[in-house]
Amino acid sequence: MSQKLAFLASDADVARDAHARLVQMYGSVDLDQADIIVALGGDGFMLQTLHATQHLDAPVYGMNRGTVGFLMNAYEGDGLIDRLSAAEEAEINPLSMTAVDVEGHEFSALAINEVSLLRAGPQAAKLKISVDGRERMSELVSDGVLLATPAGSTAYNYSAHGPILPIGSAVFAMTALNAYRPRRWRGALIPKASHVDFEVIDPKKRPVMADADSRSFANVARVSVKSETDVVHRLLFDPGHGLDERLIREQFV
């Protein structure tokens, strides 16, 4: 029996054109009936698709019809069924973020790439960092800090000079953003099983926002982050072009 495919596309014209062509060639079913979901766009659209379909068991195969395509395969309409049959699967867990703002309101979100805390005013943020209930840094003065998954380590984290992490490694990258004090501190590797807590020092004078894969929350006072092992995202890649290969290739660009 042939596999049932569901095609999704970003709002970009090139993605919409590809969507129309592929649906005509292969047909498309509703998401809850699909064996494989094919996402057409860039990395941002792939993240949207993974979040929107996390309740489904079908893996997601991305084809690049956007600007950034680290999580995407090359686009080619012909031979798609053979490519899907040969594709290799990677499984990733998102981060779970719980944030409390200065008014005591609590917010939760999942992040496949990273959770970041960013200064939201003219003054640098002041943050206290604890890991597994133990204070590790009493005061980080910086533009912010982020915690990245291996899959997200080539995104904002890498641009901020954080380390690239192999897929499957049981660590996260904590990376400081323009640290003023301690001036030479760049970050740390955090075990995946750990719970990380950030406390904003003087949040009304030095406002901070929290962001989880572009979902933003203003005026946070505390942020807790852990791995959400109950959620598993399944991604498909062409043989020889999986996430491990992409991580290696990214470091030699």
Image (cartoon, rainbow, N blue to C red):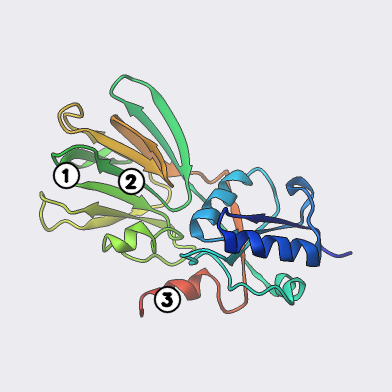
Answer whether labels 2 and 1 touch (C-beta < 8 Å): no
Residue 202: % across, % down: 16, 29
> Label 1 amino acid?
Leu
User: Quarter holding the N terminus?
Assistant: bottom right
- Mark 2 or mark 3: whose residue is earlier in sequence: 2
Mark positioned earlier in the residue sequence (2 or 1) = 2
Pick the front one: 197 or 41:
41
Residue marked by disc 3: 248
Q: Which residue is mark 2?
A: 116
Please tell me how crowded label 1 is: few (under 14), some (14-19), or many (20+) other residues with Cα within 10 Å. many
Circle 3 SS class: helix
At label 2, the amino acid type is: Ser
**From what the image shows, is residue 108 above or below residue 174?**
above
Choose between 119 and 90: the one closer to the eye: 119
In contact (CB < 8 Å): disc 2 and disc 3: no
Q: Amino acid at mark 3?
A: Ile
Q: Residue furthest right?
A: 1
Q: Residues within 10 Å of mark 3 (few under 14, many from 20)?
A: few
The residue indicated by pointer 1 is 140
Residue 141 visible within the image: yes
- Residue 146: percent from left, percent from top: 31, 49
User: Does label 3 or label 1 sit earlier along the sequence?
Assistant: 1
The mark closer to the camera, 2 or 3, is: 2
Residue density around tag 2, few if under 14, some if 14–19, many if 20 or more, within 10 Å: many
Figure disc tally: 3
Q: Give me the residue at 17% from left, 33% from top.
A: 206
Quadrant position of residue 73: bottom right
